[in-house]
Image (cartoon, rainbow, N blue to C red):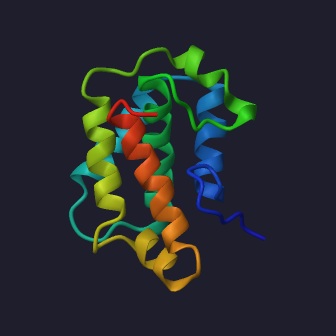
Amino acid sequence: MAAWAPGPFDNDEAADFIEDLAEAPDWRTVTALLEHVSNLNGYLEEPEGEMAVAAAAIVASCVGAGSVLPDTHAELKAALGAPPEGSANLARKVLARVVGTASELDETWQEGDGHDAWLTQIAGLQSLLNGQS
């Protein structure tokens, strides 16, 4: 059965993304995904949305004192270091895209009971990206 919960790493695509990143920590992997989603025209498919939320959560966890990284990957913050300039703005833009009207991930959450919990998670990431904890 596939993993599915409102946390930024609580689904299969996001879990795979952070697992791969932990094996080879590199900001280019994170920013390339964020740039891809940011520049994507049209409909955002669910797997890309899931990975985009994970990438934004990684940026959010590395910009300040707060962190949403899973305990199993807490060392990733130190391994990556400070995110590249502009990453927080890019992550904010991508999170807005993920909760927008042309997002399969948002549509999927709207179909179930957890949409509010998921939106709360997204808002928490936005707060971290804005320097609040």
At horizontal 42% and vertical 42% (from top left) the residue drawn is: 56
Q: Is residue 15 left or right of residue 26?
A: right
At horizontal 73% and vertical 33% (from top left) the residue drawn is: 71
At horizontal 44% and vertical 23% (from top left) the residue drawn is: 64
Q: In which quarter of the image is the N terminus?
A: bottom right
User: Where residue 50 appears, x then y in whole percent?
Assistant: 50, 57
Seen from the viewer's position, the closer of residues 5 and 22 is: 5
- As drawn, 109 above or below 69: below
Q: In this view, does 19 lie to the left or right of 49?
A: right
User: Where residue 29 appears, x then y in whole percent?
Assistant: 45, 32
User: Where residue 47 appears, x then y in whole percent?
Assistant: 50, 62
- As drawn, 38 above or below 110: above
Could you say which quadrant of the image residue 7 lies in? bottom right
Name of the residue lying farthest toward the bottom: 111
Q: How many labels does the image show?
A: 0
Could you say which quadrant of the image residue 34 lies in? top left
Q: Is residue 113 left or right of residue 73?
A: left
User: Where residue 84 appears, x then y in whole percent?
Assistant: 33, 20
At horizontal 46% and vertical 34% (from top left) the residue drawn is: 133
Seen from the viewer's position, the closer of residues 118 and 82 is: 118
Name of the residue lying farthest toward the right: 1
Query: Is residue 52 something one can see in this rendering?
Result: no
Seen from the viewer's position, the closer of residues 14 and 116 is: 116
